[in-house]
Image (cartoon, rainbow, N blue to C red):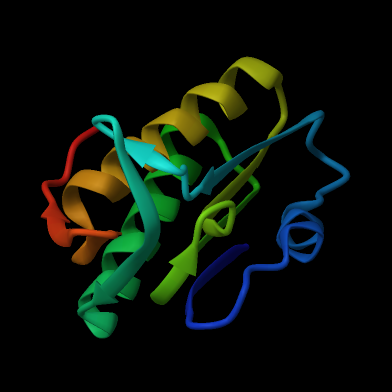
């Protein structure tokens, strides 16, 4: 079962983890991406996220389906914020439940790397003296 979500409100990590709990799985791997306070020695005030919602949700679902096929994931959650996220705030949560730990680590790493390069979610870093759109990278 997949839980795919874009939200302008804070992400609930315990709820996301609970959404992938599966008694057939011995591993749940979680990636929580947070907003850091500096980039290239510049103080970050916040990040602003924009998304092409319909396409982003479709791409996120494709990632989840691939995790199920390649790593035998029983359940996948991919939740991403939109709008403004302050320093220390959670921007993305990925949770993957698999029968064994190695698969859950690999699947989770693949999911965040693929999300950052293929899903139409754009990130703008806001500084005291300006702002910049960030180029996707793995």
Instruction: Return the residue nearer the eye: 103 or 84.
Output: 84
Q: Nearer the viewer, residue 100 or 124?
A: 124
Q: Residue furthest right?
A: 23
Residue sitting at x 69%, y 20%: 101
Indicate the position of residue 48 as horizontal and vertical percent values: 32, 70
Quarter of the rendering containing residue 103: top right
Q: Is residue 82 above or below residue 68?
A: below
User: 21 above or below 111?
Assistant: below
For image coordinates 16% across by 45% down, the residue present is: 136
Instruction: Indicate whether 100 appears above or below 83.
Output: above
Residue reaching furthest to the top = 102
**Residue depicted at 18% across the width and 52% down the height:** 118
User: x and y percent of residue 97 in the render?
Assistant: 68, 41
Which residue occupies 31% across, 49% down?
115
User: Horizontally, is 39 left or right of 130 in the view?
Assistant: right
Pick the front one: 81 or 112: 81
Q: Is residue 16 visible?
A: yes
Q: Nearer the viewer, residue 55 or 72?
A: 55
Quarter placement of the N terminus:
bottom right
116 lies left or right of 10: left
| Res. 111 image quadrant | top left
């Amino acid at each position: 079962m997949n839980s795919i979500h874009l939200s302008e409100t804070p992400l609930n990590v315990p709820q996301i983890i609970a959404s992938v709990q599966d008694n057939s799985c011995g591993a749940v791997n979680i990636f929580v991406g947070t907003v850091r306070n500096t980039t290239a020695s510049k103080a970050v005030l916040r990040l602003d996220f924009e998304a092409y919602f319909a396409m982003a949700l479709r791409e996120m679902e494709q990632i989840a389906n691939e995790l199920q096929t390649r790593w035998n994931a029983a359940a996948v959650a991919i939740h991403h914020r939109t709008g403004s996220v302050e320093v220390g705030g959670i921007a993305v949560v990925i949770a993957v439940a698999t029968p064994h730990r190695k698969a859950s680590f690999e699947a989770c790493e693949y999911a965040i790397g693929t999300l950052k390069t293929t899903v139409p979610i754009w990130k703008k870093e806001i500084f005291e003296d300006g702002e910049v759109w960030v180029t996707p990278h793995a």
